[in-house]
Image (cartoon, rainbow, N blue to C red):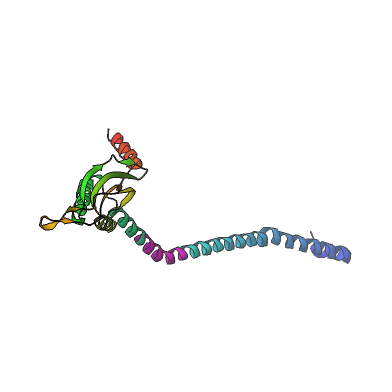
Amino acid sequence: MDIKGFFANTPKKQVYLLLGLAGAAVVSGWWFYIFQPAREHRDHLRGQVARLQQDLFQKQRIAEELPKLEVARKALQEELDKALRRLPEEKEIPTLLTQINRLGQEAGLAFTLFKPGKPIKEEFYSRIPIRIKADGTYHALGRFFEQLSRMERIVNITDLKLDQTDGRRPGTGGGTTDKATITGEFTATTFTFGGSEGEAEAGAKGGSKG
């Protein structure tokens, strides 16, 4: 085909129209097959970069908070250790009872009843009530309670009843003393770590061994 002859014999308006259509086709092809995919790929890469930057920022914040979290964890662990030290294990209860009895005697009390009760199971700990009845002075009883409050183990005093008794008691040197004498009856409750929850866990472990 003679292109020069074609353009020479074709009216200029038709030539311009053909050239315009050809140019539009080229531009459309470039837009849809080159520019548009490239722009979509660019936007996709920008989104990935933004997500990576956000992820990096979050990890940097976590890294900055790690020392603070470690300090807080150590503080909580120390508090837990202190709490556990105040809750003896069940095997330590006889020693604790002996200590309570000794403190009463050192305070000047005479125990007429010292009866540990059965453990009362709670979810994570057990309560062990001790029914106590003692004779002595107000001062001796108050000193005994003060010594109990200073113990590392937790001992709570409840259900306190006081009865006035004969004020004349045997004193030193064979004489008598007129110090006010009372009979105190109360419940001293101590606690052990491990209750119904601990028993359930122990049972589950025992069952798994079988």
Magenta region includes residue 63: yes
Q: Residue at x 33, y 48 (%)?
A: 160
- Of residues 61 and 161, which is closer to you in this image? 161
In the displayed orientation, state which residue is furthest to the left: 173
Say above or below: 102 vs 121: below
- Of residues 32 and 148, which is closer to you in this image? 148
The secondary structure making up most of the magenta span is: helix
Q: Position of residue 128 (x, y in %)?
A: 29, 44
In the displayed orientation, state which residue is furthest to the top: 210
Quadrant housing residue 62: bottom left
Q: Is residue 115 left or right of residue 21?
A: left
Q: Is residue 6 left or right of residue 180?
A: right
Magenta region includes residue 149: no
- Of residues 52 and 174, which is closer to you in this image? 174
Q: Position of residue 205 (x, y in %)?
A: 30, 38
Q: Is residue 29 left or right of residue 163?
A: right
Q: Position of residue 192 (x, y in %)?
A: 29, 47
Quadrant for the N terminus, please.
bottom right
Quadrant for the C terminus, please.
top left
What residue range appears in magenta? Answer: 60-74
Say above or below: 122 vs 26: above
Q: Residue at x 82, y 62 (%)?
A: 18
Q: Position of residue 48 (x, y in %)?
A: 55, 60
